[in-house]
């Protein structure tokens, strides 16, 4: 009898189930006459049916790219508290939903064009009419989110989110269903410490630029971009290129194939178009601070710190060809160089030839979430036999068996 040891969690009030005011919580004073609990405030806030959701799994992170990720494991417990004496219930369901919101829908006033919901998993916890006596009901659930699912994102063209939605529908038609919604962020993390090297050439000149940047970058962070402008000296022509200034810009490029709902699709099927939105995350003009080396073929070295901080959150890279939706990041670099004539190598006197060029180049930047210390669920090592602690002592080790018999009598 645990209720004798601890006060009951909910006041044992016999609530009339069909009293709507009790369900909405607007009028609860009349119910206190049969309240046997010492805590009257508690009874006033108690609703006849309540949900609680406990997520037991770690944050949902798909490790690796969509083609190779093994997905993220979700597990938890849904609790249904029936605080009233008994509630006739028609159904209890739990759904895992993916919601895609189109920021520029084909028909703005149409909800079906703007929001698309996909039920990834549905649990019918109570299928037939059942009267639930006052108690606490727990439903464990688990689901493996596939590794190629798009991570939660909020780009300028579309947002993708995931949530759990529990609904308990009372049998009485005049009672509103009890609902609970819990947002579940899904992340993608691609762990890499590699440095990517890129080469860009600029014919007809002999100039080339080598760049090195991290293979993987992270939101709300910064990374170093190293640039080297090579072959600045032309010994035959007795000329050399000088870097005058350079600028860089990190752009977030979102693309989406505009799709309408079934009702509006026939108007637009012939001009289904790709929408594109470019947002600049960070940029800078650099006028000094590089190293110029006129030995050998000549080179210029520079290093910049590129920030991924932004007023609006930077989205991670998304590649969902099946949804017609991608988010990429491009680092655009422009260098202004001018040519000058040098009478002899190593000579300090130089005169401009009047020639100038803008060297434009682009580098793809991959942005994903940090992995932290987590690992993929399938890389976890299950506990081995040695990890299992000793069992608690048996009853016969605490009291003699005769005493137990005495207690039972
Ligand atoms: Zn529509």
Image (tube, helix red, strand yellow):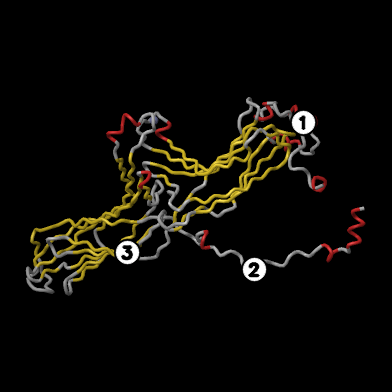
Q: Are marks 1 and 2 in contact (CB under 8 Å)?
A: no
Residue 327 position, x and y percent, is 35, 48
Query: In terms of secondary structure, where does tag 2 sit?
Result: helix
N-terminal of the pair, mark 1 or mark 2, is 1
Please report the residue visible at 24 percent of the width from the left and 58 percent of the height from the top: 287
**Where does label 1 land, which residue?**
32
Residue occupying the point 34% across, 57% down: 306
- CA gap, disc 1 to disc 2? 54 Å
- Where residue 230 appears, as percent x and y from the top left, is 20, 67
**How far is mark 3 from mark 2, CA to CA?**
44 Å
Q: In the image shown, does 295 or 213 lie closer to the viewer?
A: 213
Residue 79 found in image quarter: top right
Q: Which is more N-terminal, label 3 or label 1? A: 1
User: 344 left or right of 227?
Assistant: left
Residue 301 is left or right of residue 95, and the answer is: left
Please tell me in which quadrant of the rendered image residue 398 appears. Answer: bottom right
3D distance between C-alphas at marks 1 and 3: 70 Å
Q: Which mark is residue 196?
A: 3
Instruction: Read off the residue under disc 2.
Output: 385
Q: Which residue appears at 22% of the width and 63% of the height?
A: 209
Location of residue 218 in the rendering, given as x and y in whole percent from the top left corner: 40, 56
């Amino acid at each position: 009898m645990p209720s004798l040891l601890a006060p009951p969690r909910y006041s044992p009030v016999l609530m009339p189930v069909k009293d709507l005011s009790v369900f909405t919580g607007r009028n609860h004073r009349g119910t206190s006459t049969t309240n046997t609990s010492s805590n009257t405030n508690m009874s006033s806030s108690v609703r006849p049916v309540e949900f609680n959701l406990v997520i037991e799994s770690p944050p949902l992170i798909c490790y690796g790219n969509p083609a190779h990720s093994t997905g993220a494991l979700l597990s938890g417990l849904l609790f249904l508290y029936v605080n009233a004496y008994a509630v006739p219930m028609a159904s209890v369901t739990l759904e895992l939903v993916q919601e895609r919101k189109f920021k520029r829908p084909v028909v703005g006033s149409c909800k079906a064009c703007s929001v698309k919901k996909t039920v990834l998993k549905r649990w019918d916890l109570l299928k037939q009419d059942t009267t639930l006596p006052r108690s606490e009901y727990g439903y464990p659930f688990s689901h493996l989110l596939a590794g190629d699912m798009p991570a939660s994102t909020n780009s300028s063209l579309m947002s993708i989110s995931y949530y759990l939605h529990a609904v308990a529908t009372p049998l009485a038609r005049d009672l509103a269903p009890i609902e609970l919604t819990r947002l579940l962020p899904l992340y993608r993390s691609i762990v890499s410490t590699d440095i990517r090297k890129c080469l860009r050439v600029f014919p007809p000149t002999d100039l080339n630029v080598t760049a090195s940047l991290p293979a993987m970058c992270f939101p709300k962070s910064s990374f170093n971009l190293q640039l080297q402008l090579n072959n600045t000296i032309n010994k035959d022509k007795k000329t050399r290129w000088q870097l005058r200034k350079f600028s860089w810009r990190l752009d977030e490029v979102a693309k989406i194939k505009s799709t309408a709902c079934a009702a509006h699709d026939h108007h637009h099927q012939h001009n289904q178009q790709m929408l594109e939105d470019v947002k600049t995350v960070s940029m800078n003009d650099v006028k000094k601070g590089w190293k110029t080396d006129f030995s050998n073929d000549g080179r210029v070295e520079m290093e910049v710190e590129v920030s991924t901080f932004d007023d609006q959150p930077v989205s991670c890279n998304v590649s969902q060809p099946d949804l017609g939706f991608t988010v990429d990041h491009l680092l655009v670099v422009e260098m202004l160089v001018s040519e000058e004539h040098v009478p002899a190598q190593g000579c300090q006197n130089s005169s401009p030839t009047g020639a100038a060029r803008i060297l434009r180049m682009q580098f793809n930047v991959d942005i994903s979430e940090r992995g932290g210390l987590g690992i993929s669920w399938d890389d976890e090592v299950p506990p081995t036999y040695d990890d299992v602690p000793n069992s608690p002592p048996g009853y016969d080790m605490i009291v003699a068996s005769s005493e137990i018999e005495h207690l039972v009598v």
